[in-house]
Image: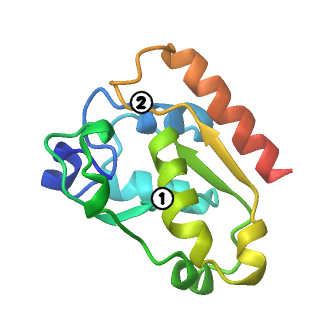
Amino acid sequence: MPSVKSLEDQQYYAHPRNAFWPIMSAIFDMQAQWDYDKRCKHIIKNHIAVWDSIHSCQRQGSLDQHITTASIIANDFNQFFSLHPHIKAILFNGTKAEQVFKRYVLPTLDGEKCSIPRYRLPSTSPAHAAMTFEQKRSEWQQALQLVKS
């Protein structure tokens, strides 16, 4: 689920300390000054789609640990995959996204959609301080290279 800042700005990964856009910039040669629309178009051009496991939920603040489990409504991935049939892999930005997908989405998927390879990556959230930016960037880059090959 996007952070409070992301929801306010209507932009994925809007918190200034979130490492997602700096990681994408390092991997896909994007400029730091690019506006949000240009960054989105650039990652799309590089065959990256960004979407949430959770459609809606109740949460105090921005931390995943504060999501009220009973309030989770997952996004409709069957429809998403039908609209985007060329998806070859799913990369989770942290543990919670993967957990929600496995619990709420995977049981609803049709046929071969269940077998799309899935990879959990370290969260780019500033709350995930156990890894340095460089460690996170390295794992994201390795995963993106793996799924492109």
- Relative depth, front residue between 59 and 124: 59
Q: Residue at x 26, y 36 (%)?
A: 63
Helix or strand or loop: what does disc 1 sit on? loop
Q: Residues within 10 Å of mark 1 (few under 14, many from 20)?
A: few
Name the residue located 77 percent from the left edge and 42 percent from the top edge: 145
- State how far apart marks 2 and 1 are (Cα): 15 Å
Residue at 61% x, 50% y: name it: 91
Could you say whether the residue bearing mark 2 is in a helix, strand or loop? loop
In the rendered image, which residue does mark 1 sit on?
50
Residue depicted at 52% across the width and 49% down the height: 99
Position of residue 119 measured from the top left corner of the image (x, y, whole percent):
68, 46
Question: Which of disc 1 and disc 2 is earlier in sequence?
Answer: 2
Residue 57 drawn at (x, y percent) = 25, 60
- Sort mark 2 into few (<14), some (14-19) or many (20+) by Cα contacts within 10 Å: many
Residue 102 versus residue 75 in the image, above or below: above
Q: Would you place residue 118 above or below residue 5 in this image?
A: below
Q: Amino acid at mark 2?
A: Ala
Q: Amino acid at mark 1?
A: Val
| Frontmost residue, 125 versus 71 | 71
Q: Nearer the viewer, residue 144 or 102?
A: 102
Residue at the far right: name it: 149
Q: Position of residue 2 (x, y in %)?
A: 29, 50
Q: Which residue is mark 2?
A: 19
